[in-house]
């Protein structure tokens, strides 16, 4: 770490990170290690405590901070506000899990409420942290501190002004409890008794240094978070318009802006009822057509101008790998494949094409990209992750957001008619959930949590992202939909996120927020969520609950108004309303690109999709140069996936789980067999399809191409940690008939090339052993067949590399490396990939692992 400006900041960079360095605001624990000594260099710490002390700055009736002439006003203006009342000194009541049985899954910790104390005055908070800084500085000078990582200290504890005592199963859990207490500034964990002591204030309140036993660990509220260089700053005209507008809005109109209509409830009737701020496209069987989409959007838009105060509704979709909820769109490879291509420029062009095809259908906003760093491949959303490498995810996230939204440094490009709002999700740590469970818990220490799972969000903010969605997971037992510290203090405060935070589908229920039900959860707004994606809840009960909470003060009016402000600010930036409103961003069917099919699945977009396939397929084995296929060969193509378009798509394609789709739904797609038949005929060869691989005379063929693939899935339906399902990664146990086909081909003595279509790395040792060549083609989308054929025939060389390590045995996940006797932890490491110039002999792989996953 090196100094940047002596009065304010430190730059934070990682080896190999070529992107702009970020500012990392550190808490006083850094001083324990002697990083700082005294004087102006202590200034960075003031910012953190300004946020964590929940200073109540003066605000206008519209919820906008009155800008005072003091440092850090930009962070105070984030609207983070004080922590909700139930988080003030409440962590002591949170029962800790047994060390032998860590908290996970859908269990909910009950937080007891304690009377809310007045928030510290801003300047008092600054004075307090100066004292704390001096205290830590002197402590560090007196004696070197033994460090547990970069933030914790051992063999010492803080005492003298304890505000709460509770149990915890680790130092990390103790720190998380401190973060959820509005008054806590430091903590001590006693390992012998699993006790956690939370402390408030500085040395003037009686803190002392005390010698203790060997199992004592202490630390600050936070180890510090990066300060991204956010290119999207306040627009004075928009802020002035918001100052004028918000006080004039009725309470019902304000609440309506915080409601998001989910796809199966997007109707004109529900829009009348709620005056909702956003509406998701319906998902009827086999998808929506362009014509029907624009017709529905016009009806909803017209109604939104009549209800409430006439604020236009935003139209939303899950464009996870293209505008894939609309029939006939270009379907790009899923994120795991884009990560394997490892080409940021390609990712940007995929984002641009997706945004333009969304504009043709009248959309304003996509709930994408997923920027999770997936660390357990049993997770059902692994294919939505670009990589297990935070650096790859960071690079792809930045590029994809730029492609979707445009360049925030160019006013004519940013959120222009050809661009849409992007959503980076899921904040934070969804890829680190215990056992890969979608609704699970995350048990990481804060610094790993920040440096691995927070890094992609730094990239998102630096790309100008306008929306962020929290995860279904919990962090040390606290639901991410109820975590004031991470949603408000960190994301909106320290990291300076200027957009709005949208909940996931009933996100306050799956990992429950204390005091909430499916029909009532103003508390989640209090912790920093700005808009609610309401799934099964009763709209009227939910809205009346918010209204009552504001009236009684349970939900502070300034937090409520700030949520409304953030949603409306984004609408104004988009050009839907306000001083930047554009005629080309009004009624959906009358917009610049609406209904213009020349921009929908056009040749340019198909070429980008085909390029993405070529660059993402990873060659794992090519024994005796079985590939490329020679021009006049007679090729036998086998396996049901070889001629099945649905297996190239995965989830989030016309249907969430991908289980209600048919071949006929994808006339724009080309299978592997169709592409090979076309190309081999051009070259004087042939390609014949046999689903089972059986033919009368194998001597009539020179080569077999066998394609096997997973059935489509998404989210929880793809989780492999469910006790009622097999937890094994063994592809063969789930696709017995496929393996029998490959076995038949091997016995025929035909050289065989195997292509795996999957949303994650799988245990396929038996498949690799029986194949002369083996390719991981992921979920390649509508150009999958064409892009794969380009590689098989040698028209292009392989360049894809693994975005995840490949498992050596059926129970191996990234979080459980299971080191083996030969010292290797994975069959193929992250970044592995062959090409036609560099072949590698793969020895016979072990097949008879005895593990119970």
Image (cartoon, grey):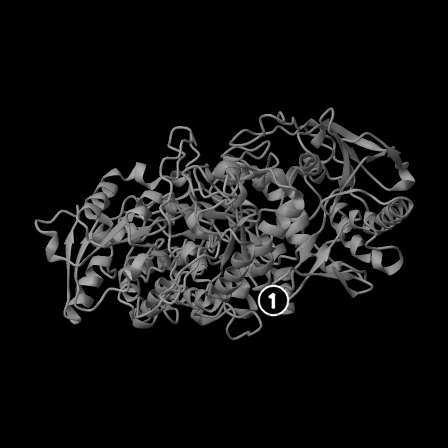
Q: Residue furthest left?
A: 696
Give the side of residue 210 with respect to residue 3, left or right: right
Q: Please say whether residue 256 is visible from this viewpoint.
A: yes
Please name the residue that numbered disc 1 is placed on: 18
Residue toward you, 406 or 527:
406
Left or right: 715 as drawn, with respect to 556: left
How many numbered circles are shown?
A: 1
Residue 149 vertical placement versus 158 (above, below): below
The front one of 706 and 121 is 706
Q: Position of residue 5 (x, y in %)?
A: 79, 66
Q: Where 599 sits versus 513, above or below? A: below
Residue at image position (62%, 57%) is: 497
Image quadrant occupied by the N terminus:
bottom right
Where on the picture, by quarter, is residue 568?
Answer: bottom right
Judging from the image, what secondary structure is the residue with disc 1 in? loop
Q: Is residue 63 visible?
A: no
- Position of residue 346 measured from the top left corner of the image (x, y, whole percent): 43, 67
Q: Position of residue 422 (x, y in %)?
A: 49, 59
Q: Quadrant of residue 94?
A: top right
How would you rate the neighbour count of disc 1 (Cα within 10 Å): few for under 14, some for 14-19, many for 20 or more?
few
Q: In which quadrant will I find the C terminus? A: top left
Q: Residue at x 81, y 60 (%)?
A: 70
Residue closest to the eye, 250 or 153: 153
**Rendering coords of residue 51 (x, y %):** 74, 49
């Amino acid at each position: 770490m090196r100094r940047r400006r002596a009065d304010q900041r430190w730059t934070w960079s990682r080896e190999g990170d070529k992107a702009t360095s970020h500012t990392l605001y550190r808490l006083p624990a850094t001083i324990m290690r002697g990083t700082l000594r005294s004087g102006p260099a202590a200034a960075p710490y003031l910012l953190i405590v300004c946020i964590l002390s929940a200073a109540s700055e003066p605000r206008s009736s519209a919820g906008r901070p009155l800008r005072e002439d003091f440092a850090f006003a930009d962070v105070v203006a984030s609207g983070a506000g004080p922590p909700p009342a139930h988080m003030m000194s409440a962590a002591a009541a949170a029962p800790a899990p047994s060390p032998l049985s860590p908290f996970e899954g859908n269990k909910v910790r009950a937080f007891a409420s304690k009377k809310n104390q007045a928030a510290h005055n801003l300047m008092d908070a600054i004075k307090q942290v100066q004292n704390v800084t001096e205290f830590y500085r002197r402590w560090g000078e007196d004696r070197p501190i033994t460090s547990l990582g970069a933030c914790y200290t051992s063999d010492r504890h803080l005492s003298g002004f304890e505000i709460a005592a509770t149990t915890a199963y680790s130092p990390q859990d103790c720190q998380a409890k401190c973060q959820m207490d509005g008054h806590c500034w430091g903590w001590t964990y006693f390992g012998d008794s699993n006790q956690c002591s939370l402390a408030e204030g500085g040395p003037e309140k009686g803190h002392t240094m005390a010698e203790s036993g060997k199992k004592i660990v202490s630390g600050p509220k936070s180890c510090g978070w990066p300060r991204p260089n956010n290119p999207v700053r306040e627009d004075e005209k928009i802020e002035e318009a918001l100052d004028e507008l918000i006080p004039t809005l009725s309470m019902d109109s304000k609440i309506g802006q915080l409601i998001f209509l989910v796809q199966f409830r997007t109707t004109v009737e529900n829009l009348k009822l709620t005056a909702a701020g956003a509406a998701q496209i319906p998902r009827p069987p086999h998808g929506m057509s362009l014509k029907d989409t624009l017709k529905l959007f016009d009806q909803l838009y017209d109604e939104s101008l009549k209800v409430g105060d006439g604020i236009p509704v935003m139209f939303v979709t899950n464009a996870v790998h293209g505008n894939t909820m609309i029939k006939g769109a270009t379907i790009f490879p899923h994120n795991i494949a884009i990560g394997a291509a490892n080409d940021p420029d390609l990712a940007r062009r995929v984002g641009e094409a997706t945004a333009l095809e969304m504009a043709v259908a009248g959309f304003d906003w996509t709930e994408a990209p997923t920027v999770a760093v997936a660390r357990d491949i049993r997770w059902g959303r692994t294919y939505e992750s670009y990589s297990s490498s935070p650096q790859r995810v960071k690079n792809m996230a930045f590029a994809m957001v730029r492609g979707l939204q445009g360049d925030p440094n160019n006013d004519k490009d940013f959120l222009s008619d050809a661009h849409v709002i992007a959503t980076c999700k899921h904040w934070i740590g969804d890829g680190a959930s215990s056992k890969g469970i979608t609704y699970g818990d995350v048990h990481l220490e804060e610094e790993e949590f920040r440096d691995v799972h927070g890094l992609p969000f730094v990239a998102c903010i630096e790309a100008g992202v306008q929306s962020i969605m929290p995860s279904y997971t919990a962090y040390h037992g606290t639901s991410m939909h109820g975590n004031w510290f991470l949603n408000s203090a960190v994301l909106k405060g320290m990291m300076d996120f200027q957009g709005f935070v949208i909940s996931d589908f009933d996100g306050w229920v799956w990992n429950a927020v204390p005091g909430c039900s499916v029909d009532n959860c103003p508390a989640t707004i209090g912790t920093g969520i700005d808009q609610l994606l309401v799934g099964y809840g009763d709209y009227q009960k939910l809205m009346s609950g918010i209204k009552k909470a504001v009236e009684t003060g349970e939900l502070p009016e300034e937090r409520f108004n700030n949520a409304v402000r953030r949603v409306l600010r984004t609408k104004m930036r988009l050009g839907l309303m306000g001083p930047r409103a554009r005629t080309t961003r009004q009624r959906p069917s009358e917009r610049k690109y609406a209904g213009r099919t020349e921009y929908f699945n056009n040749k340019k977009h198909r070429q980008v999709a085909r390029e993405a396939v070529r660059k993402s397929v990873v060659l794992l084995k090519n024994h005796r140069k079985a590939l490329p296929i020679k021009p006049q060969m007679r090729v036998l193509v086998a396996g049901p996936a070889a001629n099945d378009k649905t297996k190239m798509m995965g989830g989030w394609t016309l249907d969430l789980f991908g289980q209600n789709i048919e071949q006929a739904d994808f006339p724009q797609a080309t299978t592997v067999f169709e592409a090979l038949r076309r190309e081999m005929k051009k070259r004087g060869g042939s390609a014949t399809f046999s689903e089972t691989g059986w033919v009368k005379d194998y001597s009539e063929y020179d080569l077999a191409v066998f394609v096997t693939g997973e059935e489509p899935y998404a989210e929880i339906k793809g989780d492999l940690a469910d006790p009622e399902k097999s937890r094994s990664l063994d592809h063969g146990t789930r696709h017995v008939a496929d393996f029998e086909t490959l076995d038949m081909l091997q016995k025929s003595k035909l050289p065989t090339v195997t292509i795996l279509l999957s949303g994650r790395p799988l245990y396929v040792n038996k498949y690799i052993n029986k194949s002369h060549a083996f390719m991981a083609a992921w979920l390649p989308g509508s150009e999958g067949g064409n892009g794969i054929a380009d590689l098989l025939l040698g028209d292009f060389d392989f360049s894809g590399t693994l975005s995840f390590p490949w498992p050596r045995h059926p129970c191996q996940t990234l979080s459980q490396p299971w080191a083996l006797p030969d010292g290797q932890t994975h069959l193929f490491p992250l970044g592995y990939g062959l090409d036609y110039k560099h072949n590698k002999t793969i020895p016979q792989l072990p097949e008879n692992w005895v593990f119970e996953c």
